[in-house]
Image: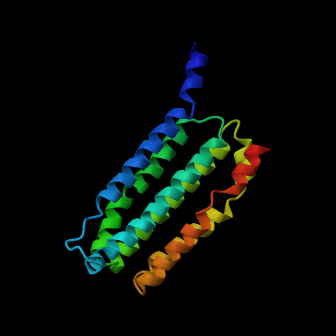
């Protein structure tokens, strides 16, 4: 009986469902920040452009995390309590994305909001890296360990994000360009995981 309970407790179904629900709420909050323009002509859309651009960037990032999180858990056989807390740590930083997105857009990409937005992305990237490392050490997760290796892709992304945060105090558009570069790097789900799981 105790063994059956342990197996249910270590299952990943509830973790996936909870994470999907939180990410869905994050996206919903962001889309609710998109306001209807006051006028009826194309020119009335111009003041909303910063809001729309920041929304697109954040939507892509949240979508990337959702996609890669799905692939990460797909390769996992067992979970432990530490993995659950690591997952909550990731969701915490992702939950701040709507607030920082709105602040960045309403200040028309001012230096400090752009820098803090990058800090949040950096912390989310670090949280994802920690989660992956914890899952790699779990029992029965050999395929994931082989797929990720040392995970230079995640490390490089965090370095680029850190550089973008520093750069935002000098040129916010170059900083945002680096955020876009990170999104491009991660846009396609990690094929290493798919390949090893298929094997």
The x, y position of residue 156, in whole percent, is: 62, 69
Measured as percent of width and height from the top left, residue 146 is found at 75, 50
Where, quadrant-wise, is the C terminus in this rendering?
top right
Q: Decide which of 62, 114 is in the foreground and name it.
A: 62
Say left or right for 51 vs 67.
left
Can you see residue 100?
Answer: yes
Q: Is residue 39 above or below residue 142?
A: below
Residue 100 higher or lower than 144, as above or below: below
Location of residue 117 in the rendering, given as x and y in whole percent from the top left corner: 40, 68
Task: Name the residue at 58% across, 56% down.
Answer: 129
Q: Viewer-proximal residue, 192 or 140?
A: 192
Which residue is at 76% across, 48% downward?
196
Image location of residue 154, percent across then percent down: 61, 62
Q: Residue at 31% of width from left, 66% of height from top?
A: 102
In the image, taking residue 139 as reference, residue 109 lies left or right, namely left
Which residue is outermost to the bottom?
A: 170
**In the depicted structure, whether residue 97 falls above or below residue 112:** above
Residue extending farthest to the top is: 1
């Amino acid at each position: 009986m105790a063994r059956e309970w342990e197996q249910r407790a270590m299952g990943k179904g509830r973790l996936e469902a909870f994470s999907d629900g939180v990410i869905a709420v994050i996206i919903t909050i962001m889309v609710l920040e998109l306001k209807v323009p006051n006028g009826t002509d194309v020119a009335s859309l111009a003041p909303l452009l910063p809001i729309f651009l920041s929304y697109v960037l954040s939507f892509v990032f949240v979508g990337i995390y959702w996609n890669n999180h799905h692939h990460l858990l797909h390769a996992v056989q067992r979970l432990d309590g530490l993995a659950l807390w690591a997952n909550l740590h990731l969701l915490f930083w992702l939950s701040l994305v709507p607030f920082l997105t709105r602040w960045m857009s309403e200040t028309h990409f001012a230096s400090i909001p752009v820098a803090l937005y990058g800090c949040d992305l950096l912390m989310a990237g670090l949280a994802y890296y920690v989660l992956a490392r914890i899952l790699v050490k779990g029992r029965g997760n050999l395929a994931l360990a082989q797929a990720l290796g040392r995970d230079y892709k995640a490390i490089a992304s965090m370095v680029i994000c850190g550089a973008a945060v520093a750069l935002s105090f000098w040129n916010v558009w170059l900083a945002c360009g680096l955020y876009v570069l990170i999104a491009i790097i991660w846009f396609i789900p990690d094929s290493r995981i798919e390949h090893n799981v298929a094997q």
